[in-house]
């Protein structure tokens, strides 16, 4: 048997190698709702810096999970979308979100807010 290139303690570790960190799962979750431009992602995640967002997007692209679409227009326009491989994470990301909702309710009750839900409420209410 050839020497392994890499050893993982569990396959969960391999998953977290690709989607782990504070912002990657959030980016991927938002992309499950369709293509997003850089500015849209920044608006959805106001605490992320441009530098970190760019770094995370590049890493996700290098792992083949997202695709960067660059349009040849002035000013430059770039969108990000999930690849077919990235779409295989959809159910996992949505389950993480549901678990997070339960955890927030259990731990914080009505003393916490989920920004993406507030944005969604404002958009649907026309605010």
Image (cartoon, helix red, strand yellow):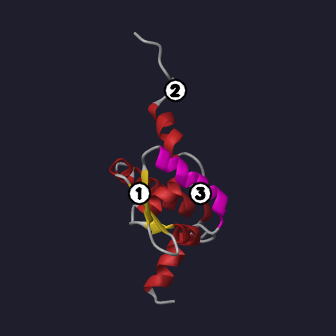
Q: CA distance from mark 1 to mark 3?
A: 23 Å
Q: 22 and 84: which one is in front?
A: 84
Q: CA distance from mark 2 to mark 3?
A: 30 Å
- Badge 3: residue crowd in 10 Å (few <14, some 14–19, many ≥20): few
Location of mark 3 (residue): 54
Location of mark 2 (residue): 9
Location of mark 1 (residue): 94
Q: Position of residue 91 (x, y in %)?
A: 36, 53
Q: Position of residue 68 (x, y in %)?
A: 45, 58
Q: Work out which residue is located at the far left of the displayed protein and give it.
A: 84
Upstream in the sequence, badge 1 or badge 2? 2
- Badge 1: residue crowd in 10 Å (few <14, some 14–19, many ≥20): few
Is residue 32 shown left or right of residue 58?
A: left
> Does residue 125 lie above or below 8 as drawn?
below
Q: Is residue 50 magenta?
A: yes
From the viewer's perspective, is the residue at label 2 or at label 3 nearer?
A: 3
Q: Position of residue 66 (x, y in %)?
A: 43, 53
Q: Is residue 48 magenta?
A: yes
Upstream in the sequence, badge 1 or badge 3? 3
- Badge 2: residue crowd in 10 Å (few <14, some 14–19, many ≥20): few
Q: Secondary structure at mark 2?
A: loop
Q: Secondary structure at mark 1?
A: helix
Q: 88 and 38: which one is in front?
A: 38
Write down the region rendered in magenta. 47-62
Q: Work out which residue is located at the far top of the displayed protein and give it.
A: 1
Write the residue at 57% across / 71% down. 115
> Does residue 5 lie above or below 115 as drawn?
above
> Does residue 16 lie above or below 107 as drawn?
above
């Amino acid at each position: 048997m050839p020497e392994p290139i890499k050893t993982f303690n569990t396959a969960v570790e391999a998953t977290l190698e690709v989607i782990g960190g504070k912002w990657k799962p959030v980016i991927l979750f938002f992309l499950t709702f369709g293509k997003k431009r850089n500015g849209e992602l920044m608006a959805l995640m106001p605490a992320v810096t441009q530098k970190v967002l760019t770094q995370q997007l590049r890493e996700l692209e290098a792992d083949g999970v997202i695709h960067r679409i660059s349009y040849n227009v002035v000013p430059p326009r770039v969108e990000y979308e999930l690849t077919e491989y990235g779409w295989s994470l959809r159910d996992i990301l949505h389950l993480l979100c549901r678990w997070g909702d339960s955890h927030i309710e259990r731990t914080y009750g009505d003393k916490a807010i989920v920004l993406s839900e507030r944005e969604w409420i404002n958009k649907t209410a026309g605010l």
